Image (spheres, rainbow, N blue to C red):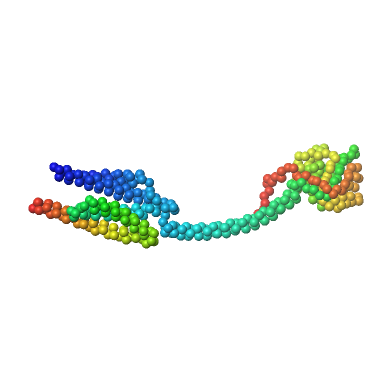
Amino acid sequence: MTIITVIIGTALGILLGFLIPTIPYSASKYLAIAIVAALDSVFGGIASHIKKNFDLKVFISGFFVNAIIAMLLTYLGQRLNVDIYLAAIIVFVGRMFNNLGIIRRYYLTKISQKFSKNTTKKH
Amino acid sequence: MKLKINASKEKITLSIIVGVVSLLLVSTTFIQFKTVDKSQESNVEGLRSDELKTQIATYKSKYEEAMEQYDENQKTISEYRATMDENKESTDLLDKELNDSETLLGLTDVCGEGVIITLRDTDEATYTAGDLITLVNELKYAGAEAISINDNRIVNLTDISAINNSFIVINSDSRISSPYVVKAIGDKSYLSSTLNLKNSGYVDLMKVNNLEITVEQSDYIEINKYSKELKVNTMKEAE
């Protein structure tokens, strides 16, 4: 069920992405940081799902609020002439790697468990 | 049962939310891709200031290069100009030479002081081609620069000959007859005095033969150019 909605959402997203006209380049910086924040939330959500402590409210709030705050911080950085978005990117990408590590480890153990089960069955 | 429905409801909500999230994420990502792609096609309005700075620097170096090229080209042009001026001088010189040559050859209308000699056959005697040749030679000897007989210009290829001792032909195909009006441009007094020399002069020689001849000096004589084409068939310039 979830996978189907994800596929439909992705397909619609690609379609929409091509249909919607481009935004001005000066605004693309904010969109980029929002995308990174959203990606971080998505990976965080997957990781928490694996850890069995997934909370929909936390996920949704993280998804939107992180993105918005990241954009606001970028704007502030622009006004202050400090590249705050770099800090945001470092934090988000670092967390993304953390979460990816959790996901990777989870599937690795799952696969190895399956593999060892198969081998024990054979014996 | 109720629990199950609740569970499935939750699942549905979750799925929908996840779908919406992926839609948002993917669509924004693609918008961003498009924006970045487009921005690389250098639309200045959408660029950030640091990018603009680098572009300005690039354009500046390009401009300097172009300026150098321009200066070089300008230099070349001025060189060409100088050469052209030189060429013009030589062209002018050549033109002048050509004009002089044409004048000497008799290919231009000329005017100036000189003498007009009128020869008329009488009942007793007629002018022969030889007489005319002698007159032309005399005039040339006296320094005539341009001569014409009945408006036929005498050039270096001119021939005067008699056909069947009955009529005189000049310049190969122009038949002329009495009265012969010979115009000669040159020093008028020298010309007339040469012709009028006592006893041995042309006038006296003709008069002895009972021929009618008058010589008049003029301050302004016009002699037309040689009307035919000067053709060279056989001769070439020796190397």
Report the quarter where the N terminus of chain B lies: top left
Percent of width and height locating residue A3: 22, 46
Work out whether residue B47 or residue B9 is closer to the camera in this orientation and state it: B9
Residue found at x 19% / y 44%: B9
Percent of width and height locating residue A44: 24, 55
Residue B140 lies left or right of residue B16; in this view the side is right
Instruction: Residue B25: tell me if it is visible.
Output: yes
Number of numbered markers: 0
Report the quarter where the C terminus of chain B lies: bottom right
Residue A77 lies left or right of residue B231; in this view the side is left
Work out whether residue B139 or residue A7 is closer to the camera in this orientation and state it: A7
Residue found at x 82% / y 51%: B186
Work out whether residue B66 or residue B125 is closer to the camera in this orientation and state it: B66
Return the residue found at the far front.
Answer: B2
Instruction: Residue B155: tell me if it is visible.
Output: no
Residue found at x 30% / y 48%: B24
- Above-or-below relation of B43 to B212: below
Residue B77 lies left or right of residue A10; in this view the side is right
Percent of width and height locating residue B22: 27, 48
Percent of width and height locating residue A70: 32, 56
Return the residue found at the far left.
Answer: A123
Residue found at x 24% / y 45%: B16
Work out whether residue B67 or residue B226 is closer to the camera in this orientation and state it: B67
